Image (tube, rainbow, N blue to C red):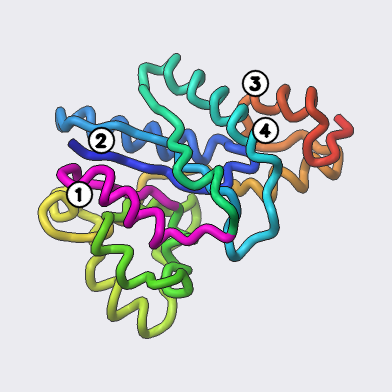
Amino acid sequence: MKRVFLGGSFDPVHDGHLSMICLVHQRLSSLDLPYVISFLPTAGNPFKSMPTNSDHRLNMLSLACDLLQNQGINISIDTTEIHQIPPIYTIDTVQTLAQRYPTDERIFVMGGDSLANLHVWKNYEKILTHIKIWAFARKGKGKGKGNDDIALNVLARMTDDFDDFLKDKAIFYDKSPVPAISSTQIRQAITDAKQPPHLPEPIFDYIKNHQLYKTVL
């Protein structure tokens, strides 16, 4: 069994996140591989400011799950991180997941920009001993590279061939197109009273109804 986790603040969840989930689903289902996919929202990223209230983010993720399930994609929300006291470190989470699912192959999905910053994550070398990484490039962005450490310890374990990833590579760099959008850009658009791009309508309606991000639209 492959257990796939898409982590993040999801503040808010947007089309970029949903696109990655759809692409993972399409590839794994086409190979007839057994798998489950989960959103893995964090209580707080050590590199970012405090996110919106966790209840609102969970509610928006529930709406995203409904949208995906309408497309035939079963997905759940894993609350391992979101009820903890921040900061939350990925190394602690992947160790917890390894203890919980010791016989399953665990895969952590992220954007290519997160992969490029992996070298600043706490105990980043140990993360790959507990979980594989499936990283997506954003449209118009090339393969991210960090310092010499990332080149030696991470890039050498990366492949853009999915078969090699299934065999022995720790990181799959997926070049499938994903919308180049961030939650930060969406929040700023809403704050500026602009129509936010790549935001599903049910989630935008929720944001407006609850006046999140100083909504004035």
In contact (CB < 8 Å): disc 4 and disc 3? no
Marking on residue 56: 4
Res 180 visible: no
Q: How many marks?
A: 4
Give the Cα separation between the discs numbered 4 and 3: 13 Å
Q: Which residue is mark 2?
A: 27
Nearer the N terminus, badge 2 or badge 3? 2
Nearer the N terminus, badge 4 or badge 3? 4
Nearer the N terminus, badge 3 or badge 1? 1
Q: Quadrant of residue 123?
A: bottom left
Q: Amino acid at mark 4?
A: His
Seen in the picture, residue 131 relative to 6 is either above or below; the reply is: below
Res 101 visible: yes
Residue at 27% over, 55% down? 132
**Percent of width and height locating residue 64:** 53, 26
Q: Nearer the viewer, mark 4 or mark 3?
A: 4
Q: Amino acid at mark 3?
A: Pro
Few, some or many residues within 10 Å of mark 4 (<14, 14–19, 20+): some
Q: Amino acid at mark 2?
A: Arg
In contact (CB < 8 Å): disc 1 and disc 2? yes
Of the 4 image quadrants, the one containing the C terminus is top right
Q: Amino acid at mark 1?
A: Phe
Q: Which residue is mark 3?
A: 202
Marking on residue 98: none
Residue at 23% over, 67% down? 157
Marking on residue 162: 1
Nearer the N terminus, badge 1 or badge 2? 2
Nearer the N terminus, badge 2 or badge 4? 2
